[in-house]
Image: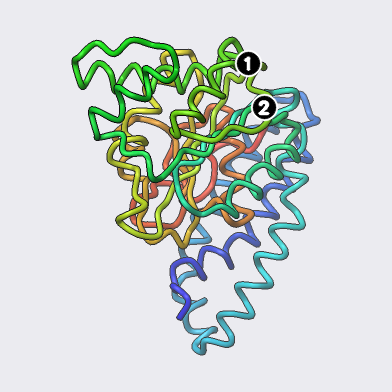
Amino acid sequence: MIDIRHHIYSLAAVFLALAIGMVIGTSFDSDPTTSASGRRTIQRYETDMRKLKDEIIKATQTKEERTTALRQCQEYCRAIMPMAISGKLEWRNIALVQTGDYDDLTGSVKQTLEMAGARITCVADINGDFDFSDDEKVSQALATTGLTATGNAKADREKLFRVLADTVSSGKRAYMAANLEKAEVAVFTGACDQQAKMVVILGGASSDERNLSLVVDSQLPAALQKFGVTVVGCETSSAVLSYVPGWHKAGIATVDNADNAIGQTCLVYALGGEMANFGTKETADRLIPKSLGSI
């Protein structure tokens, strides 16, 4: 049965789409008063969305009705999303790091970012079978990459994450990709020889055995941020085990519904600098961006 919370927010996204259209219209107006009015309109719509909860529940009592309404609203939001994100990430280089095991998410996120004008550079798929908590394996991985282990487990682990972050984002360590693959740490595709000042981490696990959040996702964001990178974590709304709590501790913006149009829109704005925990799960604090003007 569909989670009624997700269903309600998906229906409300129709009204969000209308608000987005208003802001797009005012974005060409240089009058700051008009722009502020557009933002207030969006905030009013968000309040109205939440007030609609009871009415929506009453109007859609059966599973079939909920399923139909959800599909129609998602289709509507997907149709209008290009207008909301077009050009927002123009000429920005963005790298992707997959730490979760929902492979389909990588493709849809890549498509969304390119729709917003971004160029996807390096894509790293972290090996879920590599045990980052195993001190010996970490030491061996460093040796394979041509680096010397310090003998301090914590320092060595940080060193490995630093190398991984450097390879993904700096554009200066592309040669390390082959070494990290040989060490079975990750698999790389794309152009790692191009600098990326933005990185999206794609997480969420389908089981405890595939959960990398306690080790990888708790340390990789900090390693990336040391290179001056903007980091955003995202996952699907259906992830069995959410990585969002770990990302919260790492202090990065998050999107817990990046598999649908509203979440993908939020992802674009999060990369543009809006710090929030977007989505529909209990860990979220915002459904939509505060500003839908220009990034």
Q: Residue furthest left?
A: 152
Q: Image height check: is 286 above or below 68?
A: above
Q: Is residue 266 above or below residue 50?
A: above
The kind of residue on which mark 1 rests is Gln
Where residue 7 appears, x then y in whole percent? 52, 70
Residue 266 image offset from top left, x and y in percent: 57, 43
Residue at (44, 33) in percent of width and height: 185
Dot label at residue 121: 2
Where in the figure is residue 246, as x and y percent of width and height? Answer: 31, 40
Q: Position of residue 222 (x, y in %)?
A: 37, 22
Q: Amino acid at mark 2?
A: Thr
* Residue 138 shown left or right of residue 11 in the figure: left
Q: Nearer the viewer, residue 192 or 218?
A: 192
Q: Residue at x 31, y 38 (%)?
A: 131
- The local secondary structure at tag 1 comes to loop
The reply to whether callout 2 and callout 1 are in contact (CB within 8 Å) is yes
Q: Which one is in front, 76 or 144?
A: 144
Residue that mark 1 sits on: 195
Quadrant hosting residue 218: top left
- Place residue 39 in its image quadrant: top right
Please rate how many residues cluster around mark 2, counting C-alpha atoms within 10 Å: few if below 14, some from 14 to 19, many from 20. Answer: many
**Distance from the alpha carbon under mark 2 to that under mark 1:** 8 Å
Q: Residues within 10 Å of mark 1 (few under 14, many from 20)?
A: many
Give left or right: position of 182 versus 94. left
Q: Is residue 94 left or right of residue 61?
A: right
